[in-house]
Image (cartoon, grey):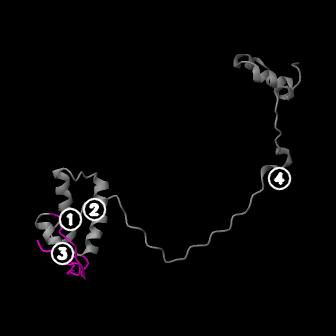
Amino acid sequence: MPAADPNRNVMCIKLKKELPALAKPPFPNELGKYVHEHVSKDGWDQWLKESVRYINTYRVDLSSREGTEFMLKQLRIWLGLEDGDLAQTAWTPPRRPSARPRRPRRPAIPRAKSTERNPAFQRTKVTRAAELPVRIRMLRTTPWVVRRSICEFCFLSFSPCP
């Protein structure tokens, strides 16, 4: 086989332009020879990007006969050598920008911390249980069953039961 000519151009059937050709046939069969003679490097790069979508959408295993046949059929349809529709992919083309301009975003307004807004929300850090009121200390250490018997009024008012 003669050495590949790096300056060789082909009339790409996909891009309809004369562009640099592939260095070697992509497949060792008739389709590979056809692609080498009629598809440019840019056109082949487009197919490689498109083929990734088919592989990901249909989870094609290229090591199996069925997967290879599926991809070759999609390539023939993509090149226009075979009639049919390309398989659907999960990829959707990006949306074109709309004609109307977008409204600019408003700058963020810095918010005050809750303690700056209302000093009543200031929290104090209790370091020891001894500093807590007796009723709360008792609730913290009492099991749940005993806690239910404590009067709600007594707990809220911190006063002895009537």
| Comparing labels 4 and 1, the label whose residue is closer to the camera | 1
Q: Who's the residue at 28% across and 58% down the image?
A: 54
Q: What main secondary structure does the magenta stretch of the protein show?
A: loop
**Image spot of residue 116 (x, y percent):** 82, 52
Which of the pair 53/42 is nearer the observer? Answer: 42
Distance between the alpha carbons at the discs numbered 2 and 3: 25 Å
The residue wearing badge 3 is 4
Q: Are marks 2 and 3 in contact (CB under 8 Å)?
A: no
| Comparing labels 3 and 1, the label whose residue is closer to the camera | 3
The residue wearing badge 1 is 75
Question: Magenta segment range?
Answer: 1-27
Q: Amino acid at mark 2?
A: Ser
Category of crowding for the residue at label 1, using alpha-carbon neighbours closer than 10 angstroms: few (below 14), some (14–19), many (at least 20): many
Distance between the alpha carbons at the discs numbered 2 and 1: 8 Å
Left or right: where does residue 102 sit relative to residue 41?
right
Q: Counting residues from the N terminus, which is met first, the one under dot 2 or under dot 1?
A: 2
Q: Amino acid at mark 4?
A: Glu
* Residue 130 visible in the shown view: yes
Q: Counting residues from the N terminus, which is met first, the one under dot 4 or under dot 3?
A: 3
Q: Counting residues from the N terminus, which is met first, the one under dot 2 or under dot 3?
A: 3
The residue wearing badge 4 is 116
Q: Are marks 3 and 1 in contact (CB under 8 Å)?
A: no
**Where residue 84 is drawn, which disc sits there?**
none
**Where residue 51 is drawn, which disc sits there?**
2
Identify whether 148 is placed above or below 52.
above
For mark 2, give the secondary structure: helix
**Image spot of residue 77 (x, y percent):** 19, 66
Q: Are marks 2 and 1 in contact (CB under 8 Å)?
A: yes
For mark 3, give the secondary structure: loop
Q: Counting residues from the N terminus, which is met first, the one under dot 4 or under dot 2?
A: 2
Distance between the alpha carbons at the discs numbered 4 and 3: 76 Å
Category of crowding for the residue at label 3, using alpha-carbon neighbours closer than 10 angstroms: few (below 14), some (14–19), many (at least 20): few
